[in-house]
Image (cartoon, rainbow, N blue to C red):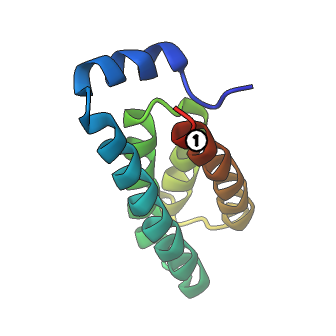
Amino acid sequence: MSHLNLDEINELKDIMEDGFGELVEAFIADSEEKLSALHDALAQGNATRVGELGHSLKGASGNICAAALADIYKQIEHAGRDQNLDGVADMVSQAEAVFQEVRVELQAL
């Protein structure tokens, strides 16, 4: 099962042409950086920062047509904004696993 909406990805590839590869590279690098920051914010108990990072990652995932990943980040965003970090570590682990699958799918395109 793909974590990407392939119809939307194909439209995006048509629109971006040669820039699509750069978009994928930027998405992967940015996501890795922000996932690391998310771990740090969670370890520090900084719910506000967790919410901000969740929001940013949600938007980036939506832009790359990875709706399931965006949904996980949306849950993380809301938990941070609600100042409730219970269960967020599990959500981050789930997000990382799905991100790795999304990365493989994107790099195969």
Residue 61's place in the image compared with 1, above or below, is below
Query: What residue is at 75 percent from the left and 61 percent from the top?
Result: 90
* Nearer to me, 58 or 104: 104
Name the residue at the bottom extreme. 44
Q: Residue at x 52, y 66 (%)?
A: 35
In the image, residue 17 above or below residue 20: above
- Where in the figure is residue 83, as x and y percent of width and height? 52, 66
Q: Please state the horizontal and vertical placement of residue 41, each as a whole percent of the image.
A: 50, 78
- Say above or below: 95 vs 21: below
Q: Quadrant of residue 89?
A: bottom right
State the image coordinates of residue 55 (x, y, percent, origin top left): 40, 52
Q: Residue at x 60, y 84 (%)?
A: 43
**Quarter of the image where one finds residue 64:** top left
Quarter occupied by residue 2: top right
Image point (61%, 50%), residue name:
99
Q: Position of residue 101 (x, y in %)?
A: 67, 45
Q: Secondary structure at mark 1?
A: helix
Query: Front-most of 81 and 5?
Result: 5
38 versus 40 height, above or below: above
- Quickly name the residue at label 1: 69
The one of 69 and 108 positioned closer to us in this rendering: 108
Number of disc labels: 1
Q: Is residue 45 left or right of residue 100?
A: left
